[in-house]
Image (cartoon, coloured by chain):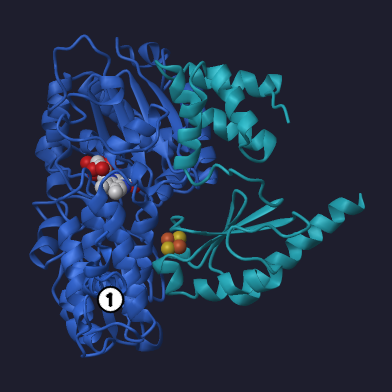
Chain colours: A blue, B cyan
Amino acid sequence: MEKIVLPEIKHLHLIDVYLANGGFNAARKAFSQSPDDIIDQVKKSGLRGRGGAAFSAGLKWSFMPKTTTKPKYLCVNGDESEPGSFKDRQIFEFNPHQLIEGILITCYAIGAKTCYIYIRGEYHKWIRLMENALADAYRHGFAGEQMKEKFNTDFSCEIYVHKGAGAYICGEESSLMNSIEGKRGYPRVKPPFPAQYGLWGCPTTVNNVETIANVPPIISNGWNWFAKIGEPKHPGTILFGISGHVNKPGVYELPSGTLLTDLIYNYAGGVPGNKKILCVIPGGSSMPPLRGDQLEGIKMDAESLKAAGSAIGTGGVMVMDEDTDLVKVLARITKFYYHESCGQCTPCREGTGWMLKILNRILRGEGSVNDLDLLISVANNIEGNTICALGDAAAWPVKFMIERFRDYFEERVSKEIKLPVANKVHSMRKTEFPLAEIKN
Amino acid sequence: MDFKFTRENLDKINDAIKRYPDKQAAVMHALWIAQAQNGWISNEVMQEIAKVLEINPEDVLGVVTFYTMYHQEPVGKYHLQVCTNVSCMLRGAYDIYETVKKSLGIENMQVTADKKFSLEEVECMGSCGSAPMIAVNEDYYENLTVEKIEEILKSLTLTLSKEEGV
Ligand SMILES: Cc1cc2nc3c(=O)[nH]c(=O)nc-3n(C[C@H](O)[C@H](O)[C@H](O)COP(=O)(O)O)c2cc1C
Ligand code: FES
């Protein structure tokens, strides 16, 4: 199968090699057409965002206002902090110029003169690699003012790397914009959406690294070619990152719609010791977990996974064998969201902590069966009640893990229904401060 | 203790300022540069950054306290960051974590008495496919085993004692 984003070409990260393989021809082709034509082609190609929500890239670009006096911006999201995701770093390392070319085309299409590539702070090495590639592109005239001469056009754009500093929430698009502005990375209330009110109040588009890296091949080979790869409703290849209990973990670029079992058993070499699979999280830790005995026939694309009760997310597949302690896994996932909640919204800030407390109680062997319902109730009260989707991301694993593995969790808690804590406090107050005595 | 940027670092910050329509946006760059120069972000560092960028010190503080990678206290010469998130955990991250704790004799967010090592339990670092992992300062060490982490700790200690010998 042809690889689009990470082709197997030696030293492709070097600009000379990239150029020798047709590099920057797509940009040249794009600049000879109108921006609206480019948006139209990307729309028709069916390219959907690879950052989590799988939203149509072309449609998102078309939201950018055409008549505005304000500057417009492109943000490329390389925050890559969702547990189980490790694909964008491959692009920084092995094909950075295709990302740069994708940025040029995208900026041209939406009319942006400035692009910020936001990369998580922990990726020191990949930031250096990306900055080196960028410096090479500038030196060769493929970015900045000299573009005009190089491509013989009126268009040019500047590209900068913005280094994060350790905050998962900054992957959320509005938080990312606040972070670029030099503020605390709090998500913003939407609407207004970034296309109306983004960076410094100007029209802004935010796209994932992999999404943008897909743009040059679409322009080169035509939307028709792209639309035919993989599943028609979510076409193209996807960089699947597979981790956990598999023999060959890593990133595999495969057509969308590849069978999950194929990915696990053929590409990732199956489960060590030929153990059975207990659970798979198919799209990064935020996505609803699937039961190991229900993986047959599940295809890896947005629509199929939705039908199977989960979501494609970032394509980060985490595999857990039959000996995995799911309570421990869920507690660890919840600890992550508790740690990463920005603290703006009460349901998320408090709820994640409560869920963690309850899960730790179950881990200590002190849980009771009503704790399971309590967990689901807390999760339900977080979901949909927060400014950004981190709340949902924290709620889903808890809610769906317990619902789908109810039998497993019930074995880990006592059958005895314990008095809710609130009532205990109430009755304690009664005995310690009898109302009758507080008369004078 | 007073803090002043070196000439070279000031140039770097001025370079960063040019990338944005607003000076405040350079604050994260400035903090990274300051941390490289000073090792950690003290109050004096924040005051100085506020002055250079012409913003309120409170706004610098707000940024420092939001992002986990800016050290608000000095860390060891080698800052060890052990990922214990799910993909790493499934492949033995907690054994790695315990080994590090035991051999250094410190707990999470502590620094050894000789200030050579510090330890931080971190969230997913994007190495799930080569788990378990640790980062030492800026470098990733992946596909670890308990034996390998012991080797790494040994070689770090050796490097330090060689440096002292010179
Ligand atoms: C808590 C949270 C974290 C996110 N982290 C990332 C991330 O690390 N990288 C990313 O591309 N998108 C992330 N997203 C999704 C972005 O908000 C946004 O939808 C995406 O960058 C859009 O790009 P796309 O349309 O190309 O997928 C995150 C969303 C949420 C709610
Ligand atoms: S879980 Fe440790 S690097 Fe992702």
Above-or-below relation of A289 to A86 = below
Ligand 1 quadrant in view: top left
Q: Position of residue B135 (x, y in %)?
A: 58, 56
Residue tagged by mark 1? A431
Q: Nearer the viewer, residue A345 or A207?
A: A345
Tell me the subunit letter for badge 1: A
Q: Nearer the viewer, residue A178 or A218?
A: A178
Residue at left offset 17%, top offset 69%:
A376
Residue at left offset 16%, top offset 52%:
A229
Q: Position of residue A44 (x, y in %)?
A: 9, 37
Give the left or right position of residue B48, taking residue A235 as reference. Answer: right
Give the left or right position of residue A358, taking residue B134 as reference. Answer: left
Q: Which image quarter is the C terminus of chain A in? A: bottom left
Decide if residue A197 is in sight here.
yes
Above-or-below relation of B98 to B135 = below
Q: Position of residue A146 (x, y in %)?
A: 43, 13
The quarter holding residue A302 reads bottom left
Q: Position of residue A61 (x, y in %)?
A: 17, 30
Q: Nearer the viewer, residue A241 or A71?
A: A71
